[in-house]
Image: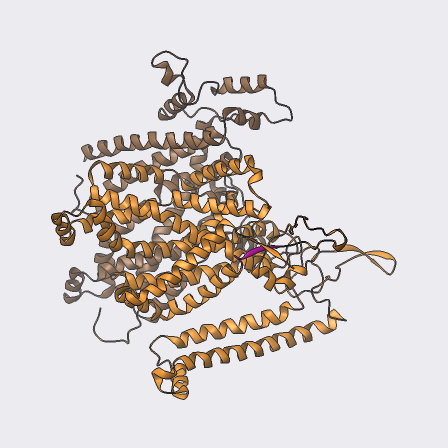
């Protein structure tokens, strides 16, 4: 069974980003100063645990970023040497393959989490006559002979089995962690003890607590997903858990790509404005003041409309609808980047104004080093900590902003699943009677986890890289008679 | 100070010209006046005569940027860009392009009043609530109250405002039936329509602002005058209330002042969800209907308010902080 690799724009961007992060991590070995700052990030318990959760989300995103289309089986009777190969119209990713079961179990319409019957009444033929009852789901709870009697027992059994497996996985991971600490603590036993008492260099006990919580949740979910729809189904019968997992990639794409798209303009223009001052400064200040004066939603709406017109006029550029929707998402990120560079530019400009007056820049000028060389080798590396902090902080802001943009109507393509889209649909669902609450809750749960993890990690990065921010962290000090 | 204001405001005029050009360019790269006419006339078969008539009525029959056929100054002034921009500068907003052709100036005036009844309470209560909460956290700093308060702040800021709105509407309007779901009424009745949006808007921003103000307060607490005040024997509460609050208000005012333009423009999301007929809803209608007349007026208003409020903040800054002199 052959397949054809489908390379989407956002896939390229995501993989490039992942690669650069890996390259940077390897390069850190030769940069002791930066390495010590990143180690400080890892020493923050909240940042370490949040970083681990983020890593899981990144894994889901990367799995979902390897797309391919299967070759359609050819009729062996008509096979000839020069026959063209045809590919499936639906594009799958590795995540889709892993969640194949969830994809295949599509119901007719709404159903509650772990339900065995649909959410609304329907006309069903029972014993020859038509009745309006809640019909049995095609896949959810289909293995139960008598749903009323067997449901509770089956669910409990699955949850317990899942918890057991989760616990086993957790213990296995903890043992693996202790094994890596073997050398530092002198043997597996002392390492294990140190781990449980929290006497390790890195805050690994909170990480273990996070791991335990994750295993306790993921285990039962996997066990239940085999027979039920764990988070219910939406209007077209798709499993909500599947939709939420697919939306993680969209959130990541928008958060990461948009932040990256602001960087070139912001850094270049900010350094130019701060370094040359004079009329260059005036022009660049005018540019970003004008840009900030326009209400951002309107600006983004106008640009998205432009993109829409371009896409409508060129339907032949794309082989599948997915490629078209993906390019729309990619261009949305570029637009968000092109309209959001003003804040970072201001910060970089202020920092450059300060750096410009320092001695080493003056010495370089005295040596006759050209302006561009000074900017590239002295100024830009020294503003990077500011850039890093702002980038990491704006990641979560952009994920939240995407929801608002989708509500206004200028977000991602409706065929791309996103948290904003799920929330948007939730408006109508919550006003139904009986209430359809599960789609909204799933979006809420996943989005809050992702944004909270991103925020906690960003706080850790900011505390490590910004010397002033560290003073304002909450430190629980024992009650002493003196103040301050 | 008047010198400074005049300079700021003339720079502001330059900004407005730039904003106007940008909007014009962005809008007309997407649509030509012919497309706009087709969309707004509607119907299945639109003839060229109808399109020309529509354009003539609204002044879109001239060239967009440069009239090559005119003589001298007419080449510049006899264009859509010039005529539309000049009328905007004179605050003559004209009529909207849609079929209803409403008087935009009248709409803006009535809707701005409605937006203000929602936005002013939000703005004031926001500052008071966030400052109060931050003060509480700083008073009990480095204790469990501070720790859990900060945890709650981080949790609250990780939740999107859309969640607050939907859950709040569901809980208070549908389940508890305390307030109506959406809508607006004039007079004293407006209170029952505004309670929920104000409360939810407060909650959605409390996390970010309280955390920010907490940092600003802590920065003030490290100064020498605070240490002197304590050495003099003043209690912690008095030190916080009478000394630190005033000095920390300076950065708070700057950050709160940056929200001023949005006070006038109205919150897009809240007005839309709660059916409040303010400027925010007007903007969303304009975007959806691709009504250029409305969009350019709202962009112009937004830019104007941004310029004015920045100048206002600078003036207030000199009043609050006597060390600052306007250049």
Pinpoint residue A484: horizontal percent, then vertical percent.
22, 68
Q: In this view, does A159 lie to the left or right of B58?
A: right
Q: Which residue is drawn at 54% across and 20% down?
A: B54
Count every numbered label the image shows and give the total.
Answer: 0
Q: In the image, is residue B317 part of the stretch drawn in magenta?
A: no
Give the image quarter of residue B227. bottom left
Give the color of chain A as drawn: orange
Q: In this view, does A293 lie to the left or right of B222?
A: right
Q: Which of A41 and A19 is in front in this view?
A: A19
Q: Which residue is drawn at 29% across and 59% down?
A: B215
Q: Which of A3 and B195 is in front in this view?
A: A3
Asked if residue A347 shows in the view, the reply is yes
Q: In this view, does A332 lie above or below B219?
A: above
Q: In this view, does B296 lie above or below B125?
A: above
Q: Which residue is drawn at 42% across and 36% down?
A: B113
Asked if residue B140 shows in the view, the reply is no
Q: Which of A311 and A167 is in front in this view?
A: A311
Q: Is residue B160 left or right of residue A267?
A: right
Give the color of chain B as drawn: brown
Q: Is residue A100 left or right of residue A464?
A: right
Instruction: Point out the residue furthest to the right here.
Output: A128
Which stretch appears magenta?
A64-70
Pinpoint residue A143: horizontal percent, then vertical percent.
73, 69
Instruction: Name the quadrant of the N terminus of chain A.
Output: bottom right
């Amino acid at each position: 069974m052959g397949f054809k690799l489908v390379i989407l724009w956002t896939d390229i961007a995501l993989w490039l980003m992942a690669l650069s992060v890996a390259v940077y991590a390897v390069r850190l070995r030769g940069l002791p100063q930066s390495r010590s700052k990143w180690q400080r990030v890892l020493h923050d318990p909240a940042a370490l645990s949040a970083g681990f959760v983020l890593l899981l989300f990144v894994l889901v995103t990367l799995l979902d970023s390897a797309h391919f289309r299967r070759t359609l089986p050819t009729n062996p009777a008509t096979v000839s040497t020069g026959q063209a190969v045809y590919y499936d119209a639906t594009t799958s990713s590795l995540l889709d393959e892993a969640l194949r079961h969830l994809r295949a179990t599509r119901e007719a319409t709404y159903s509650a989490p772990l339900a065995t019957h649909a959410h609304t009444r329907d006309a069903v033929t029972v014993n020859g006559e038509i009745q309006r009852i809640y019909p049995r789901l095609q896949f959810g709870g289909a293995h139960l002979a008598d749903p009323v009697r067997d449901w509770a027992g089956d669910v409990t059994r699955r949850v317990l089995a899942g918890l057991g497996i989760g616990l086993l996985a957790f213990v296995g991971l903890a043992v693996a962690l202790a094994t890596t600490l073997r050398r530092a603590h002198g043997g597996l036993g002392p390492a294990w003890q140190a781990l449980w008492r929290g006497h390790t260099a890195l805050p690994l006990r909170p990480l273990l607590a996070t791991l335990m919580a994750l295993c306790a949740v993921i285990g039962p979910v996997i066990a239940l997903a085999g027979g039920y729809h764990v988070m219910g189904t939406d209007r077209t019968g798709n499993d909500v858990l599947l939709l939420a997992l697919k939306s993680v990639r969209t959130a990541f794409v928008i958060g990461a790509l948009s932040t990256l798209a602001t960087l070139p303009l912001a850094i270049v223009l900010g350094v130019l404005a701060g370094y040359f001052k004079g009329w260059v400064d005036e022009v660049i200040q005018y540019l970003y003041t004008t840009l900030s004066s326009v209400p951002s939603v309107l600006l983004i709406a106008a640009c998205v409309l432009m993109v829409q017109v371009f896409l409508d006029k060129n339907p032949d550029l794309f082989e599948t609808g997915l490629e078209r929707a993906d390019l729309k998402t990619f261009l949305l990120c570029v637009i968000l980047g092109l309209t959001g560079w003003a804040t970072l530019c201001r910060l970089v400009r202020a920092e450059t104004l300060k750096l410009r007056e320092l001695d080493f820049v003056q010495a370089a000028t005295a040596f006759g080093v050209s302006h561009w060389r000074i900017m590239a080798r002295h100024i830009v590396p020294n503003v990077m900590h500011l850039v890093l902090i702002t980038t990491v902080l704006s990641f979560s802001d952009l994920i939240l902003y995407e929801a608002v943009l989708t509500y206004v109507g200028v977000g991602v393509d409706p065929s791309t699943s996103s948290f904003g889209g799920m929330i948007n649909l939730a408006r109508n669902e919550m006003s139904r009677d009986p209430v359809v609450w599960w789609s909204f809750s799933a979006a809420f749960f996943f989005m809050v986890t992702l944004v909270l993890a991103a925020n906690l990690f960003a706080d850790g990065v900011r505390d490590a890289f910004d010397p002033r921010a560290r003073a304002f962290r909450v430190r629980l000090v024992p009650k002493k008679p003196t103040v301050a | 100070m008047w010198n400074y204001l005049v300079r700021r405001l003339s720079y502001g005029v330059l900004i407005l010209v730039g904003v106007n050009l940008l909007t014009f360019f962005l809008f007309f790269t997407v649509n030509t006046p012919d497309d706009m006419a087709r969309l707004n006339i509607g119907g299945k078969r639109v003839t060229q005569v109808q399109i020309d008539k529509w354009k003539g009525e609204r002044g879109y029959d001239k060239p967009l940027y440069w009239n090559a056929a005119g003589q001298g100054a007419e080449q510049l002034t006899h264009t859509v860009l010039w005529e539309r921009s000049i009328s905007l500068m004179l605050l003559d907003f004209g009529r909207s392009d849609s079929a209803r052709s409403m008087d935009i100036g009248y709409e803006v005036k009535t809707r701005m009043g409605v937006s203000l009844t929602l936005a002013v309470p939000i703005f004031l209560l926001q500052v008071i609530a966030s400052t109060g909460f931050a003060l509480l956290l700083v008073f009990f700093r480095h204790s469990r109250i501070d720790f859990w308060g900060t945890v709650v702040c981080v949790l609250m800021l990780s939740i999107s405002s859309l969640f607050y709105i939907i859950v709040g509407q569901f809980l208070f309007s549908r389940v508890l039936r305390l307030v109506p779901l959406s809508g607006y009424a004039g007079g004293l009745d407006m209170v029952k329509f505004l309670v929920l949006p104000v409360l939810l808007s407060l909650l959605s921003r409390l996390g970010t602002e309280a955390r920010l103000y907490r940092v600003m307060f802590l920065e003030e607490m490290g100064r020498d005058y605070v240490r002197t005040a304590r050495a003099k024997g003043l209690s912690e509460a008095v030190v916080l209330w009478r000394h630190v609050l005033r000095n920390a208000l300076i950065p708070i005012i700057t950050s709160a002042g940056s929200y001023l333009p949005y006070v006038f423009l109205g919150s897009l999301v809240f007005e839309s969800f709660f059916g409040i007929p303010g400027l925010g809803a007007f903007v969303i209608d304009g975007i959806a209907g691709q009504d250029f007349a409305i969009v350019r007026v709202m962009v112009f208003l937004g830019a104007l308010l941004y310029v004015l409020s920045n100048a206002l903040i600078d003036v207030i800054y000199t009043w609050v902080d006597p060390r600052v002199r306007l250049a």
